[in-house]
């Protein structure tokens, strides 16, 4: 039997307040907001904030074809990097080609959002592998849906240069 779940006005107001709280704790401009901050991503960030994983997202560090990276602060005032993969405005056309050949990620649904979630997991696992073999790269902290947290590399106000910029 089919059943629908409806939210009452009180529940909707509570969700709206949570979203406003998350938006208030993110340093972003309109262009960035349109690129990576859909409702699902805002709820993911709200969960990370309410679970005391991060406290504030300060500012964008870089933008790329699959997502944007932001500097963030944990409740213990430690700097971390937050990579948010685009789910709806992704310009990364061949993402599935990178996943299909990897035996670690054999089964997943083929919706855009599910593919991006698998891609986030793959990037997390790759960072774990880099750490294991001693490559100097950001260390993975955690991931949820399309959001990946890793150590922040750089100075307080300036991220470390990207590899392509120092070679």
Image (cartoon, rainbow, N blue to C red):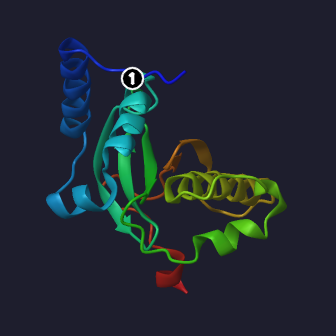
- Residue found 57% across the figure and 52% down from its top: 114
> Quick one: which residue is furthest to the front in this view?
1
Q: Nearer the viewer, residue 128 or 95?
A: 95
Residue 130 point in image, percent of width and height: 73, 60
Horizontal side, residue 129 vs residue 43: left or right: right
Closest to the observer, 85 or 63: 85
Horizontal side of residue 18 vs 109, given as left or right? left
Q: Quadrant of residue 36?
A: bottom left
Specify the farthest residue to the bottom: 167
The residue lying furthest to the right in this view is 103
Using the image, determine if residue 74 lies above or below residue 131: above
Q: Residue at x 21, y 53 (%)?
A: 28
The quadrant the N terminus occupies is top right
At numbered mark 1, what does the secondary structure look like: helix, strand or loop? helix
Question: To which residue does mark 1 refer?
Answer: 50
Instruction: Write the residue at 29% across / 19% down.
Output: 7
Using the image as rendered, state which of residue 58 and residue 87 is in the foreground: 87
Counting the numbered discs, the total is 1
- Counting from the top left corner in percent of width and height, residue 91 is at 42, 74
Label 1 environment density (alpha carbons within 10 Å; few <14, some 14–19, many ≥20): few
Residue 47 drawn above or below residue 8: below
């Amino acid at each position: 039997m089919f059943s629908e779940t409806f939210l009452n006005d009180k529940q909707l107001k509570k969700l709206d307040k949570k979203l406003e709280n998350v938006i208030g704790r993110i340093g972003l401009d309109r262009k960035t907001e349109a690129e990576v901050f859909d409702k699902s991503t805002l709820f993911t960030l709200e969960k990370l904030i309410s679970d005391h994983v991060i406290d504030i997202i300060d500012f964008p560090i870089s933008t790329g074809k699959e997502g944007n990276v932001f500097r963030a602060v944990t409740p213990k005032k430690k700097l971390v990097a937050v990579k948010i993969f685009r789910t709806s405005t992704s310009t990364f056309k061949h993402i599935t080609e990178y996943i299909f050949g990897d035996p670690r990620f054999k089964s997943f649904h083929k919706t855009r959002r599910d593919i991006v979630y698998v891609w986030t997991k793959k990037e997390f696992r790759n960072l774990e592998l880099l750490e294991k073999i001693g490559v100097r790269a950001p260390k993975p902290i955690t991931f949820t849906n399309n959001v990946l947290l890793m150590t922040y590399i750089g100075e307080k106000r300036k991220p470390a240069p990207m590899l392509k910029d120092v070679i």
